[in-house]
Image (cartoon, rainbow, N blue to C red):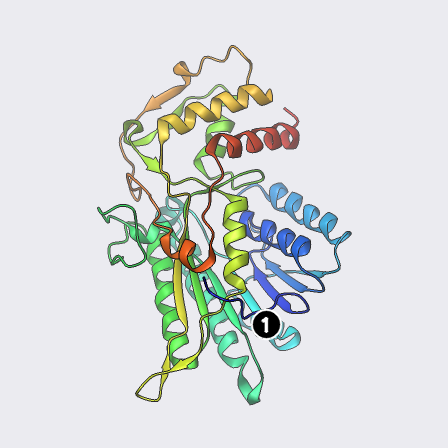
Amino acid sequence: MLSQNVKLSNSTVLITGAAGFIGSNLVREILRSFKNVNIIGVDNVNNYYDVSIKEYRLKEIETAVEVSSCKWSFVKGNIADKELIDKLFKENKPDVVVNLAAQAGVRYSITNPDAYIEANLIGFYNILEACRHSYDDGERGVQHLVYASSSSVYGSNKKVPYSTDDKVDNPVSLYAATKKSNELMAHAYSKLYNIPSTGLRFFTVYGPAGRPDMAYFGFTNKLLNGEKIKIFNYGNCKRDFTYVDDIVEGVKRVMQCAPIKETGGDGLPIPPYRVYNIGNSSPENLLDFVDILQQELISAGVLPSDYDFESHKELVPMQAGDVPVTFADTSALERDFGFKPSTDLRAGLRRFARWYKEFYKV
C-alpha cells in the first residue's frame, strides 16, 4: 500500500463540480472525516438537468457544515472562465485540487459538442495552468491534482475487465475523447511542470440524489409516469454499477497519496502521474438491473405493489456512442490503497428508491 503524503486536515482543498453528484458527496465526506479543512467549491449550476437536485445537494452540504470544524465556501462559476480560476488559485492557494466539473453524458455529446469542448477541454486546461503557476516565485503550490476521467475511455476495447494498462485509442463518443484528452493533458503537465496528478476512471456511478440523465433515474421517471422504458442492445448490455459512497471513499484515499516527484536519468522530472479505475468489478446485466430497480421502487412505495413491469419494457438495438459492457479491473486500486468498491447493487438501489420517494414526495 502507498503511504499517505498529503494531510487534508488543516489544508485548503478546491473542489470543482461541487454541486454535482460526486462532488457534493465528496465535500460532505471531507466535512465528516477531517478537521479544519478550508473547502472551496466551484460549480456553474447549469441546467443540463434539474437544478433543484443541485440546490438540494448544496443544502445538504450546508447542514453538514454546521456540525463540522471545517470551513466551506461556494463560488458559482464556470471553470472555462480563466480569470475566475486564476483568481481562486491566487486568493486561496489550494493544497489539493479535485476537478470533477465536466459536461457529462455520452448521448448529449452527439447533439451538443460545444459544451464538452468548453467544460472538458478549456476548463481542464485552465485548471492545469493554474496548478502550474501555483509554484511561481518559489511557492509550495498544489500538492496533488485529482481529476475525474471515465470508463468511457475504453471505447470499443474487447478485452475485459478493463485495465489501466490497456491501450485506449478507440473512443466511440466525443465525451470519451475529451476524457482521454484530460489524461493526456495531465500527463504532459506532470512531465513539464512536475505537477503530481491522479486520474480516476469512474464506472457508472449511481445512488441517491444522482444525475437524472443516468439510466436508473430515467427508468424510474418513466415507470412512474406509466411510460415504456427502452432497454438497449436487447437487454444484453452489462454495466459495472458503482455506488456513490464507494466512489467517494476511493477519491478520499487517493487525495492523500500524491505521486512522488522524482528526477530521471536525463535530469528531467519523471511524470508524477497515475490513473486508476474505480468500479465495482462486478458487471450486471441491464435486464437484471432494471428488475431489481422496479422491485425496490415497489418496496419503497414509489410504484404500486401490483405494477405490471413486463408491459412497460421494450428491448431495442444498441444506440450510437454506447458500448455493450463496462467492467473495471481494480487490482491497482486494491494494491495501492487497500480498497475495493463493494456496495451490493440491491442495497444501493434501495437507498436511491427511498430518496426518490422522499425528494419527489411520491
102 sits to left or right of 355: left
Q: Which residue is mark 1?
A: 95
Which is more toward the observer, 253 or 115? 253
Counting from the top left corner in percent of width and height, residue 356 is at 59, 31
Counting from the top left corner in percent of width and height, residue 278 is at 43, 51
Which is more toward the observer, 117 or 317? 317
Location of the N terminus by quadrant is: bottom left
> Looking at the image, which residue sits at the far left?
158
- Look at the numbered disc 1 and give the secondary structure of its residue: loop
Q: Tell me which amino acid carries mark 1.
A: Asp
Up-down: is 169 above or below 141? above
Which is more toward the observer, 60 or 118? 60
276 sits to left or right of 244: left
Counting from the top left corner in percent of width and height, residue 216 is at 46, 33
Mark 1, other Cα within 10 Å: few <14 / some 14–19 / many ≥20: many
Q: Name the quadrant containing residue 350.
A: top right
Image label count:
1
Counting from the top left corner in percent of width and height, residue 19 is at 60, 51
Q: Residue at point 53% right, 58% down? A: 253
Residue 41 seen by the camera: yes
Q: Name the quadrant containing residue 188.
A: bottom left
Up-down: is 326 above or below 318? below
Q: Residue at point 45% right, 48% down? A: 340
132 sits to left or right of 88: left
> Looking at the image, which residue sits at the far front?
1
Location of the C terminus by quadrant is: top right
Residue 302 seen by the camera: no
